[in-house]
Image (cartoon, rainbow, N blue to C red):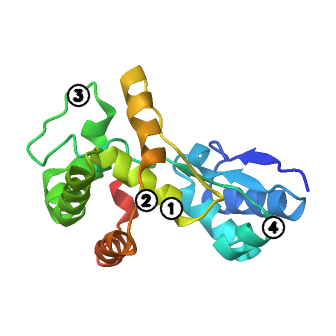
Amino acid sequence: MPILVFGVFQIGELDECERVVGEAIEVGYRSIDTAQSYGNEEAAGNAIAKSGVSFVLCEELGIGFVAYGPLGTGFLSGKYSSQKEFGNDDYRSFMGRFKPEVMENKQAVLDLLSSIAEDKGATSAQIVLAWELAQKDFIVPIPGTTKIHRVEENLGAMKIEFTQKELAAIDSVLADLEVDTTYY
C-alpha cells in the first residue's frame, strides 16, 4: 500500500481539525504529519486516537510515525539550563518549556541524558535521537537545524547502541515525568 503524507497546517478550530484528520485516515492516508498542526496538536491526536491508529496499528499497516521536534526545540539537547535567558527575538523566550521552573522540574531527565551521553562519549542530543530510533522501526525523528555541525552531530545518533538497562533507565525517568502540553 502506498504511503500518503498528510500535513495538518492551521486547519482551524479543534473540531474542524479533528474532522479533517479523521477523513484523511478514512480515505487512506498512512503518514500524518501532525508537526504542521501548530496549535491543533490536540485535535490531530484526538482524530488519530478515534480512528484506532496506534503504534500497534502503525506497525501492522506499515504506517510511518514522524516524530517532529525530537529534541524539544533544543530543550533535550542539554545545551540550556534554567538560568538561560533568551532574547525577545528568540522564539524560545515564549515557550513554557524553557521557563526556569519547568526546566528545574524536568532536570532529572536532563541529568540522566547527560550521564548516559558522558558514558558513551556522545551528546545528550545524540542520546535522545538514538533512544527514539530504538523504540520502533517505523518511528522517524526529524530534528531540524540550520547548522552543518548539528546535522553531523545528529547523524552520530545512528552509531549509538543501548543496553536494556540503559533503555529501562530512560523509560523509567520518562514514566515519572509529568507532561503538560501547555508548555510547548
Label 3 sits on what residue type? Answer: Asn
Q: Quadrant of the N terminus?
A: bottom right
Which residue in the structure is indicated by mark 3?
A: 88
- Residue name at image x 82 percent, y 56 percent: 24
> Badge 4 local density, few (<14 within 10 Å), some, or many (20+)?
few
- Residue name at image x 63 percent, y 69 percent: 46
Which residue in the structure is indicated by mark 4?
A: 61
Asked whether the residues under the numbered discs 4 and 2 touch, taking CB atoms below 8 Å apart as contact, a structural biologist would say no
Compared with 27, 55 (above or below) is below
Whichever of callouts 2 and 3 sits on the residue coming sooner in the sequence is 3
> Residue 134 has which mark?
1
Q: Identify the element where label 3 is drawn.
A: loop
In whole angstroms, how far apart are the C-alphas of marks 2 and 3?
33 Å
Whichever of callouts 3 and 1 sits on the residue coming sooner in the sequence is 3
Tell me, yes or no, if residue 147 can be seen here.
no
Q: Identify the element where label 2 is drawn.
A: helix
